[in-house]
Image: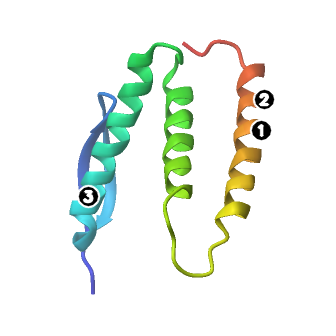
Amino acid sequence: MSQIRTLDVTIMGRDLRIACPEEEETSLRLAVEYLDEKMQAIRDGGKIVGIDRIAIMAALNITHELLHTSVDGDVDLGDMKRRMQGMSRAVDAVLAEQPQLF
């Protein structure tokens, strides 16, 4: 049976504690590093302000990358892509209605 560990990670200068199965620690640390790099690149671009908006844009960018990855099996990438585009439009509409958070 897998042991659950608590990992201390940092994303965008914020320290977080994350529970993780022992055998997935390496891949989780790689995911944290990748996400941190994506978020910092968005922040450094200067067009998006606020940690929430940066996180949403990073999530959308990573999802977009995932959808353009070749997948074997029964996954309908076209359907997933259309759904993600709809979600992206919905997120954009909600964010446009929000006042500046920071």
In this view, the residue in front, 21 or 55, is: 55
The span from disc 1 to disc 3 (Cα, nearest Å) is 34 Å
Residue at image x 50%, y 56%?
66
In the picture, measured across the screen, residue 35 lies left or right of residue 76, that is left
- Looking at the rendering, which quadrant does residue 74 occupy? bottom right
Earlier-in-chain disc, 1 versus 3: 3
Query: In the image, is residue 72 above or below residue 37?
Result: below
- Mark 2, residue position: 93
- Which x, y percent locates residue 90? 77, 38
Amino acid type of the residue tagged 1 in the rendering:
Ala
SS category of the residue bearing label 2: helix
The span from disc 2 to disc 1 (Cα, nearest Å) is 5 Å
Residue at image x 70%, y 13%?
99
SS category of the residue bearing label 1: helix
Query: In the image, is residue 49 above or below residue 87?
Result: above
Query: In the image, is residue 70 above or below residue 34?
Result: below
Please identify, in this view, whether the residue under mark 3 or under mark 2 is nearer the observer.
2
Amino acid type of the residue tagged 3 in the rendering:
Thr
Contact check, label 2 and label 1, Cβ < 8 Å: yes
Residue at image x 49%, y 50%?
65
